[in-house]
Amino acid sequence: MSQTKPRRKLPAFTLRRCERTSPTCDKIRTMPQWFRIIRNRQFAVLPILLCILLQSTRASNSEKQPQRSRITGIDHVSIYVSDANKSRRFYSDVLGLATCPQFTGPGSCFLVRPADQRVVLESALTQKENGVKSWVAEIAFATDDVTEMRRYLLATGLFPGDIRRDPDGAQYFRMQDTEGNPIAFVQRSSPKIAAAPASKQIGSHLLHAGFVVRDRNLENHFYVDVLGFHLYWYGGFRDDSVDWYELQVPNGSDWIEYMLNIPANAGHAELGVQNHFSLGVKDVHAAARQLRSHGFEKFDGPEIGRDGKDSLDAYDPDGTRVEIMQFTPTEKPCCHPYTADHPKP
């Protein structure tokens, strides 16, 4: 004669309910033992299940969260010009830059080889109508995934523009930083141009771009907290002041430079000095001789700046400063040491 395995005694509240509703009681008696245990302890099990569900949802959301793509350097700087012919002669004949292949824009485009960077000239008519004083029209950063970069910025609550494509295959979108400075992100599908710099070219790399900044903390929230830029160097006219604040891109050695403490009513001439870009050279004194050989005599320097680097300043026909700078410092900088590697020629 087989023995029946004893059943687990049902809790009192379940038995009382069984007495009132016999169909339910019958169902409970026929349940597997493990299911009855879970059912009878539902108030303890449900919070555990809810916790597991929430953790699973968080993990799933984390996996789907877009990630910031790499920012490897400066792709191009766009400059407003008032006389296209004069400016083209400056950038081609004086600085020795070759024109960009497949460029179909309304302005002009010049290559900085072998880095495959660009200087783009745009008509100043539009910015005159809008009353914009800065003649640096745009600073664009190179990224290896423009689609993921845009998704990432959208996820942080920012408003990047639509992705567009140039005739040469480059994809890009435009937006503004927290102080309204126009910037862009560019992904170039073609490999870096292998051609050597033209014999007249002064500078082999677009090292950095500078622009006036009113609130350093506000801009740092965008460039440091959101985009991942990191400190390269800062300094000032005095050892205890900060007039220049430099941040490198997260995945390269190019940098941007905040030009601080500039009067709000600064005019075109002053802003032409502050809003600028820089070309890197191995020897700035050789670059000065090369400029003179191109018939260009009016430039400042060479001289060693507060950052310890030897450089000179040339100005295009509209007064926009082009800083020609050595890649590494020749002296110890003032104010603060460098905190990242220097670019290489």
Image (spheres, rainbow, N blue to C red):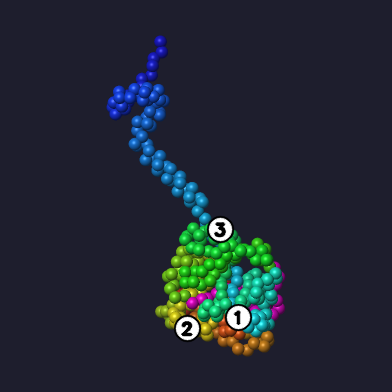
Q: CA distance from mark 1 to mark 3?
A: 33 Å
Give the residue pinned by disc 1: 81
Q: Is residue 265 something one can see in this rendering?
A: yes
Residue 275 lies, in percent from the top left, at 53, 78
Residue at x 38% of width, y 32% of height = 38
Circles 1 and 3, Cβ within 8 Å, touching? The answer is no
The residue where tag 2 is placed is: 266
For the magenta stretch, what is the residue range?
A: 194-212
Outermost residue on the top side: it is 1
Q: Residue furthest front?
A: 129
Examine the image and state in which quarter residue 304 appears. Answer: bottom right
Of the pair 105 and 190, the residue shown nearer to us = 105
Q: Percent from the top left, x then y, of residue 167? A: 67, 66
Query: Which amino acid does the dot numbered 3 rest on?
Result: Glu
Task: Tell me which residue sits at (57%, 77%) in the image.
Answer: 126
Q: Residue at x 63, y 89 (%)?
A: 297
Describe residue 167's horizontal placement relative to residue 239 as left or right.
right
Give the mark nearer the N terminus: 3 vs 2: 3
| Residue tagged 3 | 148
Q: Quadrant of the N terminus?
A: top left
Q: In the rendering, at what x and y percent does residue 123 appear?
A: 61, 78
